[in-house]
Amino acid sequence: MKNNLVAFSIFSFALCFVVGCWLISNGLNDRPTNESGAPVQTAQLFTQSEVANYLGISIEEVQKLTKITNGPDSFKSEIPHIEIEGKVYYPKSAIDRWLLNIELTIIN
């Protein structure tokens, strides 16, 4: 009886191991891929329309947040952005940090 219990335990462990490996491999294979089978990278830089969609605001509001003016009523740009060859881009990681900082400021 003991031998049967040990054999059953080993079989159960092996079965769980195989099923676990299968589940993990399926989870890894569910990532989006391009035509050559390489994983698709998510965009790290947003355009104005993409950041507007990401934040749930209009493009005009994004432009107002991005605009930097000089003078007594100057408004310094609060939204993190970079310019590359005259085009404005918004780094996703910087936008996420900016949103967290705004949320923490509002809460405190």
Image: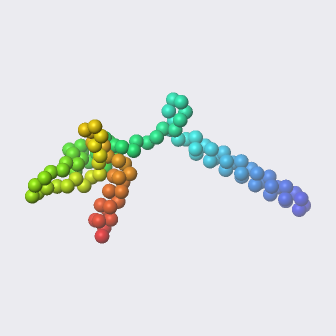
Task: Please say which color scheme the image uses.
Answer: rainbow
- Is 76 in front, or is 27? 76
Q: Quadrant of the C terminus?
A: bottom left
Query: Which of the 4 image quarters holds residue 8?
Result: bottom right
In the displayed orientation, state which residue is furthest to the top: 35
- Is 29 in front, or is 9? 29
Question: As drawn, is 61 to the left or to the right of 27?
Answer: left
- Is 25 in front, or is 80? 80
Instruction: Please give the name of the residue rendered at 35% of the width and 52% of the height, measured from the top-left corner.
Output: 94
In the displayed orientation, state which residue is furthest to the front: 85
Instruction: Please give the name of the residue rendered at 31% of the width and 49% of the height, measured from the top-left corner.
Output: 55
- Residue 66, percent across and down? 23, 48
Q: Quadrant of the N terminus?
A: bottom right
Query: Which of the 4 image quarters holds residue 58?
Result: top left
- Residue 48, percent across and down? 28, 42
Residue 61 showing in the rendered view: no
Query: Which of the 4 image quarters holds residue 12?
Result: bottom right
Instruction: Please give the name of the residue rendered at 63% of the width and 47% of the height, measured from the top-left corner.
Output: 23
- Residue 27, percent across and down? 58, 45
- Residue 22, percent across and down? 66, 45
Tally the marks.
0
Residue 108 showing in the rendered view: yes
Instruction: Please give the name of the residue rendered at 75% of the width and 55% of the height, measured from the top-left corner.
Output: 13
Q: In the picture shown, does residue 70 fall above or below 45?
A: below
In the displayed orientation, state which residue is furthest to the left: 72
